[in-house]
Amino acid sequence: MVSKLNFFLETLQVILLCIYYLLEFFLSFLFARKKNIAGEIVLITGAGSGMGRLMALKFARLGAILVLWDVNLEGNKETARLARKIGAVRVHDYICDCSKRQEVYQVAAQVKKEVGDVSILINNAGIITGKMFLDTPDMLLEKSIQVNTMAHFWTIKAFVPAMVASNRGHVVTISSAAGFNGVNKMADYCTSKFAVLGLAESLALEMLAMKRNGIKSTIVCPYIVNTGMFDGCETKWPYLLPIIDPEYAVERIVSGILRNERYIFIPRSLYLFNVIKSMLPAKIVDVLYDYFGILQVMNRFKGRTTKTEDYKYQTKAIKPPSSLD
């Protein structure tokens, strides 16, 4: 009898909490206060171009101390220069190949010594090959996982322990709509983005289990962002699934970070797509994939490659990925 009463009371408590948090979720879009990050140390990987650069400039305007990581020396220096130009007082740029564990740990130690403990970690660096899976060389498949997934392991291991010790911090994971939905010619990319989404969710739950509620998690899942990384990709119905303007994407991401949002889907219609996928029979989902143009989105993919990455991959005698960001 006691166990039945406990079950009833705990279930009622959970239902009431769910209703409360659901109301909080909807009201947060109207009334949630944004946290002040002036003076916070923000580390952004892949800061030398694309969304990484735009996020750096956005955080610079908010008074953050910037730590910029990239393998592209020239691109990273340019981001630092632009940040200082708009008034950033403290900008620290480092060359780091985030796919290399020891290099991450080495540069992380340098950051801690020269700047301090990172309070907002943004894992943004990523690559895409854009080939059919069976046509993709093994070394490029491995590189996709190393850059897009394993790099998150090493940066989290390097910087999150200090957050745990102080019960204060924020881990931002740039995943993708391809982290929820498979796409042809993106098998390695989707694998890597599914993986980091699972990592971010698991890490957030570990913080909850450890009662480290001061450490926040934000998982970003955008559709195709027009940074050059996905040049050539087309969308069939731009009203439903538009190619995302990078300025808009970064505004949405930074706003979500300041509000401690757990998930950020860009555009918001992706919320509906994920619900549909989980509820409908697989054959209906296949029909909808074709209808929305998902099967054709990569047909004219060109992407982009930086000179720095071209050189690095050529020295390893393998073909470079089609695009890097």
Image: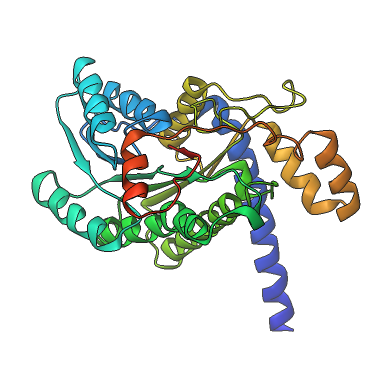
View extreme (left): residue:
114
Q: Is residue 273 left or right of residue 70?
A: right
The x and y percentages for residue 50 are 42, 29
Q: Residue furthest top?
A: 86
List x then y, in percent, for residue 231: 56, 28
Q: Nearer the viewer, residue 20 or 300?
A: 300
Given residues 288 and 128, the one toward you in this image is: 128
Q: What residue is drawn where x is 67% and y is 75%?
A: 6
Most foreground residue, 51 or 201: 51
Q: Residue furthest front?
A: 317
The quadrant in which residue 230 appears is top right
Q: Residue at x 20, y 22 (%)?
A: 81
Q: Is residue 285 above or below residue 199?
A: above
Q: Residue at x 21, y 29 (%)?
A: 77
Where is residue 174 drawn, in percent x and y?
47, 43
Q: Nearer the viewer, residue 302 or 263?
A: 302
